[in-house]
Image (cartoon, rainbow, N blue to C red):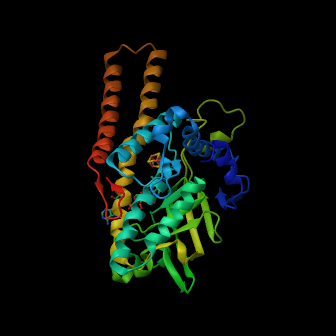
Amino acid sequence: MMTAQEYVESLRKLNTRVYMFGEKIENWVDHPMIRPSINCVAMTYALAQDPQYADLMTVKSSLTGHTINRFTHLHQSTEDLINKVKMQRLLGQKTASCFQRCVGMDAFNAVFSTTYEIDEKYGTHYHENFKKFLTFVQDNDLTVDGAMTDPKGDRSKAPSQQADPDMYVHVVERRADGIVVCGAKCHQTGSINSHWHIFMPTISMGEADKDWAVSFACPTDAEGMYMIYGRQSCDTRKLEEDASIDVGNPKFGGQEALVVLDHVFIPNEYIFLNGEYEFAGMMVERFAGYHRQSYGGCKVGVGDTLIGAAALAAEYNGVEKASAVKDKLIEMIHLNETLYCCGIACSSQGFKTKAGNYQI
Ligand SMILES: Cc1cc2nc3c(=O)[nH]c(=O)nc-3n(C[C@H](O)[C@H](O)[C@H](O)COP(=O)(O)OP(=O)(O)OC[C@H]3O[C@@H](n4cnc5c(N)ncnc54)[C@H](O)[C@@H]3O)c2cc1C
Ligand code: SF4
């Protein structure tokens, strides 16, 4: 497994094309608006090195038997699903922000089980492709973006009916050795901070949408990939010299980007769905289910720090005993623990998929 420092250094080796305010950013790793989001992902590496968190942060790989970071794991039981939520609450407490690595973990588990069922029906080799890719991810302890949301254009129309075909990621050319894809994905959490991306469809599709029913893995710095940084409110305050107040959470932060694919070539071995349109919906539902489960952990961890900060602010102002303030803090705790219960409940009611991993 990589250390936090090794993770940060690994990003410098990539040729990721990052744009902000209409300009290409060369040293994006040290950019004051981007760095807090890198610190967050780095925490997923740092805690995995800490023996006190070994049970939550690390696990034996079902593919290789090696000890791996839980963020690259295929859930093998309901206990694994529960530990996932607990790990996310811990990370939320440590960063008070979005630590971004969950979208990849959720994509791994959704694509693993869906590719098994596609191969079962069509005799394709997507599941083997995926297992090879995930072994590479686990052995190198990589961060991977789970890319699902397309720009979508006119929401009343299917992908194949859009005036602009690029409103959904699609295949523009099929070659003997792979496919060429075009399109974009919006709001991609941790996209710039990821080593690789897994692309998936964003809605159920019909036969006419075959070219849009596509899933594949691709390095973040592949030829033809562009990242446009997603602005956050008050973000330029982080650029001010010696800014120490009114910068929000100064050390940590989330990240979203618009990812543009301009004729990106995907070799056959990285393709996980290619025209089997009736499986697009299954992939979406499984991924979305896992990601809602994730919120039962991460948002609760952030909530813990928010509630603590609110209680401290009340104390500073001498109102910690006021009943109106106490009522509000109790309501926040109630909401937070209810969310956590939902994450734990859907995990404990998990079931084994045909491929063998566990679905919420
Ligand atoms: C902070 C953040 C991080 C995210 N991270 C990721 C990520 O890592 N990966 C990823 O793939 N996605 C990510 N997303 C995307 C997220 O999943 C989408 O924003 C979400 O699925 C909604 O899609 P949309 O933004 O296109 O909105 P729309 O689909 O346009 O929805 C807008 C509104 O219209 C309603 N609506 C939409 N279509 C219809 C219809 N046909 N009939 C009636 N009502 C309709 C919706 O319910 C909603 O209220 C992220 C989003 C945010 C905000
Ligand atoms: S589950 Fe939470 S912390 Fe993880 S990527 Fe999603 S919003 Fe961020």
Query: In the displayed structure, would residue 231 be above or below residue 202?
Result: above
Residue 9 coordinates in the image, percent (x, y) = 70, 49
Query: In the displayed structure, would residue 177 be above or below residue 131?
Result: below
Residue 68 coordinates in the image, percent (x, y) = 52, 49
Asked if one can make out residue 64 in the rendered structure from this viewpoint, the answer is yes
Residue 118 coordinates in the image, percent (x, y) = 36, 74
Query: In the displayed structure, would residue 247 be above or below residue 170?
Result: above
Quadrant hosting ligand 1: bottom left
Asked if one can make out residue 205 in the rendered structure from this viewpoint, the answer is no
Query: In the displayed structure, would residue 219 be above or below residue 214?
Result: above
Is residue 338 rendered to the left or right of residue 315?
left
Residue at 27% over, 43% down? 345
Is residue 254 rendered to the left or right of residue 358?
right
Q: Picture quarter containing residue 5?
A: top right
Q: Nearer the viewer, residue 39 or 162?
A: 39
Residue 55 coordinates in the image, percent (x, y) = 46, 38
- Total marks shown come to 0
Q: Nearer the viewer, residue 249 or 218?
A: 218
Residue at 44% over, 12% down? 318
Q: Nearer the viewer, residue 335 or 55?
A: 55
Is residue 167 rendered to the left or right of residue 352?
right
Q: Nearer the viewer, residue 127 or 167?
A: 127
Residue at 33% over, 43% down? 343
